Amino acid sequence: MEQLGPGDPQRLGAYRLIARLGAGGMGRVYLARSERGRTVAVKLVREELAAQEEFRARFRQEVRAARRVGGYWTAPVLDADTEAAVPWVATGYVAGPSLQQAVGHDYGALPERSVRILAAGLAHALGDIHAAGIVHRDLKPSNVLVTLDGPRVIDFGIARALETIAESGLTRTGALVGSPGFMAPEQVRGDRITPACDVFCLGSVLAYAATGRLPFGAGGSGVHAQMFRIAQEEPDLEGMPEDIADLVRECLRKDPGARPSLARILERTGAEDTVTDGRSRDPWLPSALVAQLGRHAVVLLDTENPPSEDEPPTPTLTRQPPAPTPAERPSPDEPGAGGPGSGLPVPGGAAAGGQGPGLPVAGESGAGGQGPTHPAPGHSVPGPGGPV
């Protein structure tokens, strides 16, 4: 998290912004709290996107659809203002790192059991998203948040809203909608997108989680070369446990119709024995990552609301020197005797034992409101970012 900068708003709707969580192709994401103390993630759309009516129309549509997504495995959409000068959307905050952070920086490749439960949670999340009539289109490690209960998916619908701008030629020439390392072949080719697109992306995410590598190579050799491998070549699954590799290989089939259904993926992961009601039945992460989640929660609890511009600053109480005894007081004829213009306090004045400056009364905005409902998520607060 980063402190708010001079150009950041202090409030969006009913939410008091606390810190920056990050930024992406759609806009900036902030940690915020509601007036009743709930911790949320608020995504503020980029101004140049907000100026395009084509984007706004799709954004309204996708926010409406995202609010229909139920279940336990996504960061819920809580609120939005699609008609504001700069639109925004608020989601539950997920108090946990992204899968990209966990694998790429904090820990490394996950053990087989963790990858199985990750697959089950993501399959459940995609099932809820698809049931609302949405294809995520941009499932990738940075859009998967890691909690003690299991994974949570964020940002469903964003790629669909951004795609409108690409279709109308409003993005720069050659711009891509989606993340090249985790796109499906039909996205690369510009073919029709179906829910099977998300199954391919799921396979790429599982490969990354199990190996720490992208299955079609990093983008260092060039984005076009990477997309060619996605469309034409087989994935690199070296080092993956064989059972997981077989499942991933099925998800990464070039033909969308040949990929497994989400129900089939759940069968292959043994989800009925590992997850229920949006939770992993047993600890699913290595102990080092569990400790990392604990530290993340502490940071969140220690994050205070910044002062508002329209609030007076908290007074600083200064300690007054003790009043002199009669023997120490100068006589009225001596220099410095108490009187008009003297340095001694005048009886009844601000420093003479009268009423001191008023102390602020603890209120919702700064006095320990409710913490997040997750570690547990809130997108993120969850997560992310939050969906749109």
Image (spheres, rainbow, N blue to C red):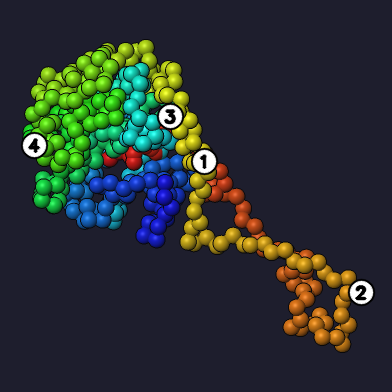
Q: Amino acid at mark 1?
A: Leu
Residue that numbered label 4 is attached to: 190
Q: Residue at x 82, y 69 (%)?
A: 323
| Mark 1 neighbour class, 10 Å CA radius: few under 14, some 14 to 19, many 20 or more | few
Counting from the top left corner in percent of width and height, residue 110 is at 35, 25
* Mark earlier in primary sequence (1, 4): 4
Cα separation, mark 3 vs mark 2, equals 68 Å
**Mark 1 to mark 2 CA distance (whole Å):** 54 Å
Rendered-image quadrant of the C terminus? top left
Chain-order first, disc 4 or disc 2: 4
The CA distance from mark 4 to mark 2 is: 94 Å
Element carrying mark 2: loop
Q: Is residue 301 above or below residue 348?
A: above
Task: Name the disc covering residue 249, or none.
Answer: none
Tell me: residue 262, above or below residue 311: above
Coordinates of residue 355 in the picture (x, y in percent): 73, 64
Residues at badges 1 and 4 in contact (C-beta under 8 Å)? no
In this figure, which residue is indicated by the disc labeled 2?
A: 327
Separation of residues labelled 3 and 4 (CA atoms): 38 Å
Residue 374 appears in the figure: no
Residue 40, located in which quarter of the rendered image? top left
381 or 245: nearer the viewer: 245
